Amino acid sequence: MIATSITVPNQRIGIWLVGVSFVLFQFFMQLSSGVVIGAIMQEFDLTAFVAGLLGSSLYIVYTSLQIPVGILYDRKNSRTLMATNAFICSIGCIVFASSHTLLGLFIGRFLIGAGSAFAFIGLSHILRQHFPLRQFPFMIGLSETLGFIVTVIGMVSLGSLLNYWGWRGFISGAGIVGLLISFLCYRFIPDSEKTHPSTINYSQQFFQIISNKRAWVNGLFVGLSFTIVTVFGALWAVPFIKVKLSCSLAEASFIGALFFLGAGVSCPLFAILAIRFRSRKLVILSSCLSTTLLVLLALFAPVESHAVMGILMFLIGICCGAYMLAYTIANELAPANSLSTCTGFTNTLAVITAPLLQPLIGLFLDNLGQTENYTVGDYQIALLAVPVSLIIAAILVLFLPDPPEVKM
């Protein structure tokens, strides 16, 4: 698939900025869960297991829709898909913020998950349409960086904002932002070029993707390595830091945000390293192993200093970003007219670990300790699931292709 050329560079950048704004919105709604769900746990008196289920409910819908969303982007108008689903995402925020029952909270999270499922694949689709394919790794890494930076800004201020506005006011404000993004998508993203579906056998190409062993290895790798973001950083890091350092929610949120700051630097950094070094596998393997070591240090080292824990969280973020290279590998493995479908398949496996491990860690905590009184030891045992996932991901790296090897 050859990128569609746009003659005006400013228009190309404008399209990217609008697309990335939807991804930023999705990122923030996903990655701020740890702080928001923590506040909801106190108001609704939820156990860690139920809180984990509520946090993961977004990912359940998000994950289940990734392949259908990829197929839709390969066939339908990206402008309509992005605008409509940004609107659905904002409605989910409003439902979530106005709910006074657990059922209402779940419905809101489901709607947010359904709408946000179209964000990342939509961005990758318009990048392939309007940018040269050789720029894809850097642009997708830069997009991820912006996502993490917005998350950092939000998480640094979120603890304080929740104290003044409450989580309901904050999520309602997010819903208004979602409405604005929906308008921008409809106004500035061009209609997709017409395709000729009669000449393309989508079912054959989809079967070609799911029967490719390397596509499965690639997807499982990113799913296991991405747990550092979706399971640790997005949900359980802030509660763990709060207990380990005996600090306030605002202080724990600030320290947790340093992880996302590091990850924001990491994503384009690893895109550059993968180009500079001959062995892409070596770059990815070093990322997995160094992240594992640093997570174990954060969990078990006798750290009492806020500064030292902040440095550890930042370094974990710096080392974790090689997971983004899985989307470049997905482009190399995909049939020419099914790039978004292959991205959806990869993204399904990337986020499927979140709805599994988020509540599982909560269940471990419930069984290990007393509700609302978890110890550092309880968190250390429960969160071992994260470094174990990273070690398995490191093993899978050995079976990933370097660029010259990629063949269907």
Image: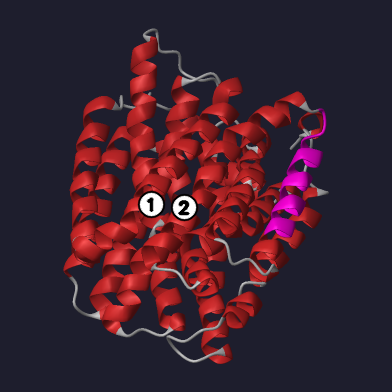
Query: Which amino acid, by three-letter code, is at mark 1?
Result: Val
Label 1 SS: helix
Q: Quadrant of the C terminus?
A: top right
Instruction: Confirm whether the magenta stretch covers residue 229.
Output: no
The residue positioned 39% from the left and 11% from the top of the image is: 9
Mark 2 or 1 closer to N-term? 1
Residue 101 at x, y percent in the picture: 22, 80
Q: Which residue is mark 2?
A: 257
Residue 259 at x, y percent in the picture: 54, 51
Measure how far apart labels 2 and 1 are at the Cα level.
6 Å
Vertical order, 41 against 331 (above or below): below
The residue positioned 52% from the left and 67% from the top of the image is: 241
CB within 8 Å, label 2 to label 1: yes
Label 2 SS: helix
Q: Is residue 71 visible?
A: no
Q: Is residue 249 left or right of residue 228?
A: left
Residue 98 at x, y percent in the picture: 16, 68
- Residue 70 or residue 145, whichever sits in front: 145
Q: Which residue is mark 1?
A: 156
The residue positioned 55% from the left and 72% from the top of the image is: 244
- Residue 127 or residue 35, whichever sits in front: 35
Residue lying farthest front? 305
Query: Which amino acid, by three-letter code, is at mark 2?
Result: Ala
Q: Which residues are magenta?
A: 278-294
